[in-house]
Amino acid sequence: MPAEPILHGYFRSTASYRVRIALNLKGIAYADAFHHLRKGEQHSPDFLALNPQGFVPALEIDGAVLTQSLAICEYLDETVGRRQLLPHDPLRRSRVRAAAQLIACDIHPVQNLKVLDRLRGLGLDGQQVADWARQVIDEGLEAFDRLVAGEDGPYCFGDQVTLADICLVAQLVNARRFHVDLRWPRLAEIEQACLALEAFRRAAPQNQPDAE
């Protein structure tokens, strides 16, 4: 019998949040392994042996270790048929990927803990660092809102949850943490529709065993 997947993560990590949502949507039971990012536990030798980048999440599954949240989500999509996260149509699939990557590649990396710590190391004070993160998130969500503006349905791209929804809901947690003015009604509607699903609610940071 295959071993139960193990998700290495941290309750506040939005990338870990994405993978928790995907696992829940796919109906995959998993065990948690927590790594407290602010205490530097992601840099321990044992974890670096799993993921040399020292980032969460990492997912032990099917005899392998997967890293990078979008790559993990796409692996789950390709191996588990339930609730496809990417459309079959190539054009629609490209649009979903573009929206997801806008958040995962352009917003998240430049306002995550590693970058913010480097800004502090360069002499920026706490307010300047927070202002940086807030501006990055604000500009990114403005662009995201325009990408999905012409789409119907309760979710980003119609009546099915996609990878774009997973990324958006996780990013909105960070937006609130940095006091971004969430002035986009369409994004609020998408978030509300997603949070009506148990898979999203169960994956939320405040509902994790390591939440503080």
Image (spheres, helix red, strand yellow):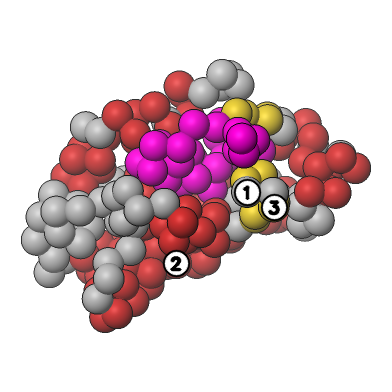
**Residue 53: numbered disc:** none
Mark 1: which amino acid?
Answer: Asp
- Position in image of residue 171 (x %, y %): 42, 48
Per the model, the C-alpha gap separating discs 3 and 1 is 6 Å
Q: Is residue 60 left or right of residue 141?
A: right
- Which mark sits nearer the N-terminus, 1 or 2? 1
Residue at point 29% right, 50% down? Answer: 83
Mark 3: which amino acid?
Answer: Ala
Q: Is residue 92 visible?
A: yes
- Number of numbered discs overlaid on the protein picture: 3
Quarter of the image where the C terminus is located: top right
Per the model, the C-alpha gap separating discs 1 and 2 is 26 Å
Q: Quadrant of residue 33?
A: top right
Neighbour tally class for label 3: few under 14, some 14-19, many 20 plus, Cα within 10 Å: few
Magenta span contains residue 133: no
- Position in image of residue 44 (x %, y %): 86, 39
Task: Decide which of 134, 3 is in the foreground and name it.
Answer: 3
Residue at point 78% right, 31% down? Answer: 39
Q: Which residue is mark 3?
A: 64
